[in-house]
């Protein structure tokens, strides 16, 4: 099973409270071995996305929190799209969102959000819509 750094940030964000997260909890939630979790946590500490206190509790840094919040936002937009537009069940939509949240650009997420909120996607000023065979609205 491949676990991305975004998966770690998401799990730590969900586990994280004022007491911090533990390696054992992160590993359990991700379904991986503790040594693997420990290795990635150290990499994320080096990237300044996480910090560890003297009791080995793990916390998101501000940079890590921002990244995790952005990922959660992407997940929620994709989940809402899957439920409202694609008519998936909530559990299915959650699974699809988890797979796609890593692949969608910020621009695509913003367009999906526009579609959900306004029923249409505004054309980019710098781009032409020529050759686009799909309508820019939900009918």
Image: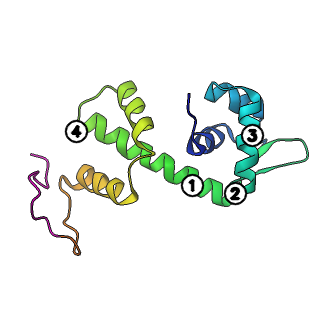
* Along the line of sight, the residue nearer the viewer: 17 or 21: 21
Q: CA distance from mark 4 to mark 2?
A: 37 Å
Q: Check the image and report above or below for 133 versus 100.
A: below
Q: Quadrant of residue 111?
A: bottom left
- Decide: marks 4, 2 in contact (CB < 8 A)? no
Task: Name the residue that disc number 4 marks.
Answer: 85
**Which callout, 4 or 3, points to the residue nearer the camera?**
3
- Magenta-colored span: 128-139
The numbered dot on residue 67 is: 1
Q: Quadrant of residue 85?
A: top left
Task: Name the residue that disc number 2 marks.
Answer: 47
The reply to whether the magenta stretch includes residue 134 is yes
The numbered dot on residue 39 is: 3
Q: Quadrant of residue 39?
A: top right
Where residue 97 appears, x then y in whole percent?
Answer: 40, 37
Q: Earlier in the sequence, mark 4 or mark 3?
A: 3
Farthest residue to the bottom: give it: 126
The reply to whether the magenta stretch includes residue 125 is no
Label 3: state its secondary structure. Answer: helix
């Amino acid at each position: 099973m491949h676990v991305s750094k975004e998966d770690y940030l998401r799990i730590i964000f969900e586990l994280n409270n004022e007491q911090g997260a533990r390696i054992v909890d992160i590993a359990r939630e991700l379904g991986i071995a503790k040594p693997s979790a420990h290795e990635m946590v150290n990499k994320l500490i080096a990237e300044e996305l996480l910090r560890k206190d003297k009791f080995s509790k793990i916390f998101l840094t501000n940079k890590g929190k921002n990244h995790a919040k952005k990922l959660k936002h992407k997940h929620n937009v994709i989940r809402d799209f899957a439920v409202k537009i694609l008519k998936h069940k909530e559990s299915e939509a959650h699974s699809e969102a988890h797979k796609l949240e890593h692949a969608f650009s910020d621009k695509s997420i913003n367009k999906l959000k526009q579609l959900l909120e306004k029923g249409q996607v505004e054309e980019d000023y710098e781009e032409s819509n020529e050759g686009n065979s799909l309508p820019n609205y939900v009918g």
